[in-house]
Image: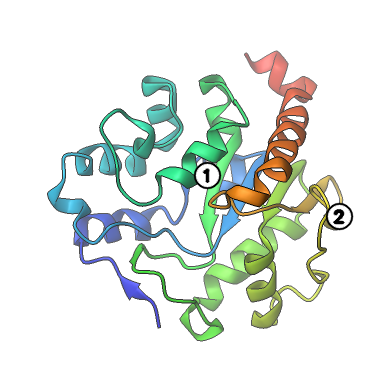
């Protein structure tokens, strides 16, 4: 069983917007994680106001501060920073903020590091994620192996193949213009660094191929 974060303000923001960054329905790059995990004392630190600002409007936050997440602002030393440091190596510019969404299988913020089970997950939220992917819109969806395994165990993503080992961004599914990739979790380090660097470059190449409609809108 997961531990919900004690901050009611943070929880309320998650319930209103169960994602980070752009709305998943509007994004071209959707990174699906297990849960949004925060330090238990986050609400008592100086980073909390930045976190609340980010969750209120993640797209505007990125454009204003030049970083995609408040954990990358100067002075933050808490948990979660390595994940976002690794994501930042993709080197997406702030003007791409509206193209990127982070959404979790668990739609409430948590503390601690306990493994999630299918019983922890909201079936309605999972069905919305399933519909998002199967809609076939031009979109790239990224899952780590643990995320893919839990999605398969839920029984709501029967189209999803088993995770593939030792490849750079293997494709797990394609439907319409949507492609589902497997990637290394951004918290990995050490022996995985070479592959993570290759995956960051591959994601950057996908992002560089901007659709004509997006170019016209700028």
Q: Residue at x 54, y 66 (%)?
A: 105
Tell me: residue 203, above or below residue 45: above
Tell me: residue 39, above or below residue 111: above
The picture quadrant where one finds residue 214 is top right
Relative to the observer, which residue lies in front, 205 or 80?
80
Question: Residue 185 in the image: x percent, y percent?
Answer: 61, 54
Q: Give the residue at mark 2.
A: 174
Q: Residue at x 62, y 70 (%)?
A: 127
Q: In this rendering, would 119 be left or right of 27?
A: left
Mark toward the viewer: 2 or 1: 2
Question: Residue 19 in the image: x percent, y percent?
Answer: 47, 52
The mark found on residue 110 in the picture is: none
Question: Residue 26 in the image: x percent, y percent?
Answer: 60, 40
Tell me: residue 2, above or below residue 137: below
Relative to the observer, which residue lies in front, 196 or 23?
196
Relative to the observer, which residue lies in front, 204 or 61?
204
Question: Residue 3 in the image: x percent, y percent?
Answer: 32, 75
Instruction: Please tell me how crowded label 2 is: few (under 14), some (14-19), or many (20+) other residues with Cα within 10 Å.
Output: some
First in sequence, mark 2 or 1: give its number.
1
The mark found on residue 23 in the picture is: 1
Instruction: Check the picture and name the quadrant holding the N terminus.
Output: bottom left
Tell me: residue 46, above or below residue 108: above
Q: Residue at x 33, y 41 (%)?
A: 56
Q: In this rendering, would 28 be left or right of 45?
A: right
Q: In this rendering, would 171 be left or right of 64?
A: right
Q: How many marks?
A: 2
Q: Residue at x 33, y 30 (%)?
A: 73
The residues bearing labels 2 and 1 have C-alpha atoms spaced at a distance of 21 Å
The picture quadrant where one finds residue 57 is top left
Instruction: Check the picture and name the quadrant holding the C terminus.
Output: top right
The local secondary structure at tag 2 comes to strand
């Amino acid at each position: 069983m997961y531990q919900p974060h004690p901050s009611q303000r943070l929880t309320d923001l998650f319930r209103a917007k169960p994602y980070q960054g752009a709305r998943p329905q509007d994004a071209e790059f959707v990174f699906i994680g297990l849960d949004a995990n925060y330090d238990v004392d986050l609400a008592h630190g100086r980073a909390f106001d930045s976190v609340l600002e980010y969750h209120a409007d993640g797209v505007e936050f990125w454009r204003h501060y030049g970083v995609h997440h408040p954990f990358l602002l100067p002075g933050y030393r808490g948990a979660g920073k390595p994940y976002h440091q690794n994501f930042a190596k993709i080197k997406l510019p702030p003007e791409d903020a509206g193209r990127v969404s982070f959404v979790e299988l668990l739609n409430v913020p948590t503390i601690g590091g306990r493994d999630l089970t299918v019983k922890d997950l909201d079936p309605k939220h999972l069905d919305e994620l399933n519909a998002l992917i199967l809609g076939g819109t031009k979109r790239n969806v990224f899952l780590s192996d643990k995320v893919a395994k839990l999605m398969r165990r839920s029984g709501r993503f029967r189209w999803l193949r088993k995770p593939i080992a030792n490849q750079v961004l293997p494709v797990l599914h394609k439907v319409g213009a949507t492609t589902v990739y497997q990637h290394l979790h951004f918290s990995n380090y050490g022996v995985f660094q070479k592959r993570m660097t290759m995956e960051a470059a591959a994601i950057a190449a996908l992002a560089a191929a901007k659709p004509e409609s997006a170019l016209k809108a700028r």
